[in-house]
Image (tube, rainbow, N blue to C red):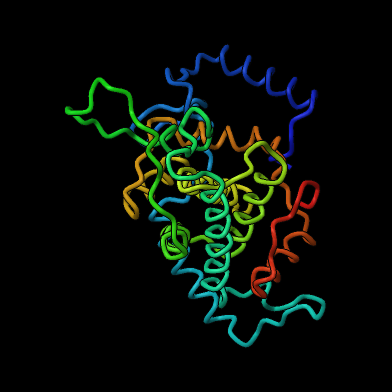
Amino acid sequence: GAWEYPGQEAQRMTSSLLERVKSAGFARADSGDYASESGSSTCPQSFKATRPRKTKDFIGEEKENGERERQQQRGAWEYPRDVDPRLLEDADADTVSEKVAQMIFQYVEEGDAAFPAGSEQGPSEDEFHEANFLRRRRCSRCWPWPRRKAAGPKASKESVFRLIDDLATSLYFCKQVVVLCAIYIDRLLSRTSTKLMTSSNWRSIVVVTLLIASKVWEDVHPWNADFEDCLDEISGIRYQPGALYRLESLFLDRVRWKVFVDGEVYVAYYFSLLSGSLRRIRPGGV
C-alpha cells in the first residue's frame, strides 16, 4: 500500500506531517534530493535513523543467517500443494536473470534499429538518456564546445546480464526482484511516452527498475546512497549528486506510481520468462 498513487486524503496527511516537521525545526537538504552517506537528507534525520538499511554488514549477516536456516530446515519444509515449488526456490535465479537480460537486449536492438546512424536521440529528446544522470567527464580540448549526442555503451546480452547479475549478487536480491524489474520495464514501455529502449537509456531504465523493485519487494532494502556506491564499485557507473533520486522520481511519475503487481501477472511473467515465450505486453496488459 505504500506505493499506491496518493489520493487527496494522503496528500492532506502528508501536508500535515510536513507542517509538523517544519515546526519542529528539522533542517532540509539544500539540493532537495537524496544525499550520499556523507551528506544530508531531505527527510528528518530522526526519521531515517529509525528505518532499517540494507548495508554491506546487513547483507553479510543475512547471507549467514539464510544459509544457517536452510541447513536447519532442509528436508523439514513442505511446499503447499497448490503452489509450484519453482516460485519459491532460488535454484533458477541465474536463469531468470539471463532471460530478463535477453528480453532487454531484444528491446534495445529494436530501439537502436529505429534510429539510423547519426539520428540517435540526445539527452534533451530522451528523458531517460543516461547523460542526464551520469557525471560528465571533463575534457580540456572539448571545452567550451557543447557535448555531442553521445550514446551509451553498446548493449549485448552479456553486458545486460552482467549488470543485472552483479547488482543482484552484490545487493543480495532474490529472483523476485529481477522479475519485477522486467514487469516494470514493460509497464514503462507500454503505458508511457517512452516507447523504446536504446543504447543510450537501457542502463538508466534497468537501474531504476531494479531500485524500485527492491523497495517494493524487500522489507529491508538498500538506500539510494548504497545503490550508488554499489554501481560505482561493480561497474564504474557514477551518478551526479541527487541524480538517482531524480531518475526514480521520473520513472514513478511516468508510470503514475503504479508499481503494484498482481500475483497472477507475476506468475505469468515468471513462467513466460522461463519458457522464452515472453512478448511485450501492450497498454493495459500489466
**Left or right, residue 279 beside residue 57:** right
Residue sitting at the far top: 23
Residue 135 lies in quadrant? top left
The picture places residue 160, in percent across and down from the top left corner, at: 46, 59
In the picture, the quarter occupied by the N terminus is top right
Along the line of sight, the residue nearer the viewer: 48 or 257: 257
At 46% from the left and 17% from the top, the residue drawn is 27
The picture places residue 169, in percent across and down from the top left corner, at: 44, 63
At 37% from the left and 38% from the top, the residue drawn is 150
Relative vertical location of residue 51 with respect to residue 93 in this rendering, above or below: above
**Left or right, residue 21 beside residue 270:** left
Residue sitting at the far bottom: 75
Relative vertical location of residue 126 with respect to residue 69 in this rendering, above or below: above
Relative vertical location of residue 176 with respect to residue 216 in this rendering, above or below: below
**Left or right, residue 4 beside residue 68:** right
The picture places residue 51, in percent across and down from the top left corner, at: 53, 41
